[in-house]
Image (tube, helix red, strand yellow):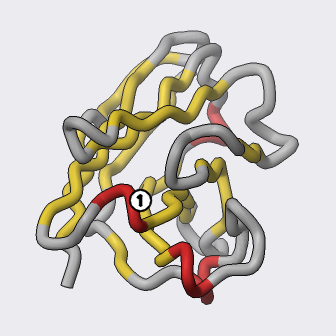
């Protein structure tokens, strides 16, 4: 079992920045590709960004390209999501997920059904 713990959420104004962190424990962190997903009230969970086990392959949802940056530090068992130029529509609970590299054919997965482990989520609220 891998435990994932997100942190860094909060209440910010439109145009501000936040950095989310996701720390993993219990399994070899670099055996997993990682991803950020979010779920807004009344909506389904959606893919935000994904990163391969070594950080060489990255993918973003179109809605966050150019504003968000995903990264990971395997020496710290931690993944990050730097969010700049936040918009009202970025308001959601943000979840980090881990998927074993043996469970996916690509380096990164944007399908939440493939993920093996999830964090508890962290709330991001963007106000005007």
Asked if residue 37 is positioned above or below residue 13 in the image, the reply reads below
| Residue 85, x across and y down, in percent | 64, 15
Quadrant into which the N terminus falls = bottom left
Q: Mark 1 points at which residue?
A: 96
**The quarter of the displayed image where residue 14 is located:** top right
- Please report the residue visible at 81 percent of the width from the left and 41 percent of the height from the top: 63
Q: Nearer the viewer, residue 72 or 101?
A: 101
Instruction: Assess disc 1: are there few (<14), some (14-19) or many (≥20) residues with their C-alpha within 10 Å of its C-alpha.
Output: many
| Residue 36, x across and y down, in percent | 52, 54
- Please report the residue visible at 75 percent of the width from the left and 79 percent of the height from the top: 105
**The quarter of the displayed image where residue 19 is located:** top left
| Residue 88, x across and y down, in percent | 63, 33
How many numbered circles does the render carry?
Answer: 1
- Please report the residue visible at 74 percent of the width from the left and 35 percent of the height from the top: 64
Q: Nearer the viewer, residue 109 or 61?
A: 109
Quadrant into which the C terminus falls = top right
């Amino acid at each position: 079992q891998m435990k994932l713990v997100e942190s860094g959420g909060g209440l910010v104004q439109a145009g501000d920045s936040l950095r989310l962190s996701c720390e993993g424990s219990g399994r070899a962190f670099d055996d997993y590709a990682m991803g950020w997903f979010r779920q807004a009230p009344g909506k389904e969970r959606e893919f935000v960004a994904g990163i391969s086990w070594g950080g060489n392959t990255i993918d973003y949802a179109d809605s966050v390209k150019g504003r968000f940056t995903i990264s990971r530090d395997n020496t710290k068992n931690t993944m990050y999501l730097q969010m700049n130029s936040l918009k009202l529509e970025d308001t959601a609970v943000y979840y980090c997920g881990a998927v074993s590299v043996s469970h996916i054919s690509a380096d990164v997965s944007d399908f939440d059904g493939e993920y093996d482990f999830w964090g508890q989520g962290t709330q991001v609220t963007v106000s005007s």
